[in-house]
Amino acid sequence: MAKKMLIVVWCVIVAGFRALAHPQETWMSLEGRFLKAAGRRLTRLEEQKIVLRDAIRSALRIFSAYAVVLAYRKRRLITACILLFFAVPVTSAILTANYTVYEYSYHGRVLGVVKTAEEVQTAVRLLEGLVVEDGQKKAVVAIKAIEPEQVSLSTGSSPGLSGFRGSQSDGDGTPSAYDIVIPVDSIEAIEIRQSLLPLTQTLGKIDTEEEVLENIVQQVDLDVIAYKVMIDGVPLGVVGSQEDAEAVLDQIKTYWLGQTDPARFKEIGFAESVSVEPISATLPEVEYPGDLLDRALAHVNNPKTYTIREGETILDVALNNGVTEQQISEWNPYIDPDALAAGDVLIMEKPKALLNVRTVEEGYFTVSIGFETIYEDTNELFLGEEKVVQPGVPGTKNAYGDIVRIDGNVVEYMEQSSVVAEEPEPAVIKRGTKPIPPRIGTGTFIVPLDNALVTSLYGPRWGRVHEGIDFGTPVGTPIRASDGGKVTYVGWDGSLGITVKIDHGAGFSTLYAHLSGTLVEEGADIYQGEQIALSGNTGFSTGPHLHFGIYLFGNSQVAQDYLPDDMPMYILSGVGHD
């Protein structure tokens, strides 16, 4: 009976000491066991606490059993009591002992604990870049994940991230992460505080020096020194180091220079004002260098385009988009304008990036010499009209000096010396002085262009009625209003191409088709003989010509019957018909 009582007393004493010393821990142990039994994944610290308490509990059970066995078999009650006497306070000391540690926090957030304050201070010195190893300053390296689709210029001949230090890639060459070297700007927010923790809470919770660094760097509001790239005062982006910013700018230069030897240039810079400024930032604000590169070249890689439709010519495309044929040819140097086919894609704007490279090199070049323009007044033309009698011819001179290019295109010659190779010839232009007639219909009609060459008259042709007169003439010939009136239509009119229509009053109207360009707008009042358009070859046409028609209340008339009798009638079959 005494032995049974001894066992009961022992269990009560141990349980009481444990519960009194750490009531909350006792409950947490039960709660941890319950959560683990319920299938919830415990943290490493929670598991270690449970393991430690189970180990102590098991040791006490074994010790108790040993004491009972001694008392029962060998009748050594005194020995058992002595063992119990020492076991209870020792167990209590183990369960109640505290351990001195140092908590470190950032902006008031506790990040972890270390054994000594020196470990945090060493990590802080590493963050400040004050610890030197192998002759080089250490710094924090923050790994930022990167999705493959975020980098559009990563492989091949494009610059992308190739050449940037620290880039990593998977086996297929796609960058998977980027190391951004970020020295910490300010560590005033990092605090160290001494603390006492129960021994059972410290096991597995003490951070190493590397873990201290990692915990600090992972803070999203960590203050870092970053570098902002500015273009004409507008931010391009933020990177983690001066070297990364310079690498982005060097890659842009490489993109435009291609295989050209940089040694041939006196200067290699940018057309825009570029600066790199150190700033205070947080980690989420720091970008990958490849992102800045993509942004700087975005317009180059995504220009405005136009897809050729069936039957369209380069002239049609130019007129429909408000540009010139020459511009289209310059923007598409590898496309033959005379061999366009449906589905061909043309670039419809001059490629321009956010940041453009400016180079200066010395060399020989030919410079054009402007010609003089001589004006002669004449009453054969209306006021405001001009007629070129003799086109000017520019002269040339061979020069030596600086050649300035932007993105490879010459923008300026800085002449140092030159020799005239050919003198310019002046242009002679007649300027009209004749008063402008009223801007209304007169009831008479004139031939709408000079030096008219009739290629087809009004009447039956190809199984239908040809409702007008065709005048064969080169593209760009000035077209005049056959009579005064109001412009009622300017634009594309199906097979007639670019067309102008004029209402002359009293039911009469005229039509001018297959034009290359127009000089008037709808609603304009014009006078007889005023220039309204330029001849062309648009729409359904077999050659450059003007289709001219006269209508009365919407019905086509025999146009030649309304024109002067002395109109030249050189009819050439099969030339410039529509």
Image: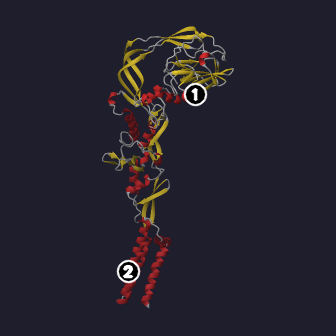
**Residue 184 visible (yes or no):** no
Number of numbered labels in the structure image: 2
Label drawn at residue 461 = none
Q: Three-letter amino acid code at disc 2?
A: Phe
Q: Residue at x 57, y 14 (%)?
A: 385
Q: Three-letter amino acid code at disc 1?
A: Gly
Q: Position of residue 491 (x, y in %)?
A: 58, 28
Is 248 left, or right, of 527 in this rendering?
left
**Residue 88 visible (yes or no):** yes
For the residue pair 242 and 481, the one nearer the viewer reads as: 481
Hey, which residue is sitting farthest bottom in the picture? 1
| Pointer 1 local density, CA inside 10 Å: few below 14, some 14–19, many at least 20 | some
Cα separation between marks 1 and 2: 106 Å
Q: In the rendered image, which residue does mark 2 sit on?
A: 63
Is 97 left, or right, of 435 in this rendering?
left
| Pointer 2 local density, CA inside 10 Å: few below 14, some 14–19, many at least 20 | some
Hey, which residue is sitting farthest left in the picture? 134
For the residue pair 123 and 258, the one nearer the viewer reads as: 258
Q: Position of residue 552 (x, y in %)?
A: 65, 22
Q: Is residue 502 above or below residue 340?
A: above
Give the colour scheme of this rendering.
Answer: secondary structure
Tag 2, which secondary structure?
Answer: helix
Q: Residue at x 36, y 83 (%)?
A: 66
Q: Position of residue 273 (x, y in %)?
A: 46, 32
- Closer mark to the observer between disc 1 and disc 2: 1
Please identify the quadrant where the N terminus is shown: bottom left
For the residue pair 392 and 196, the one nearer the viewer reads as: 392
Q: Is residue 250 above or below residue 127?
A: above
Q: In the rendered image, which residue does mark 1 sit on?
A: 491
For the residue pair 555 and 54, the one nearer the viewer reads as: 555
When asked about the image quadrant of residue 393, the answer is top left
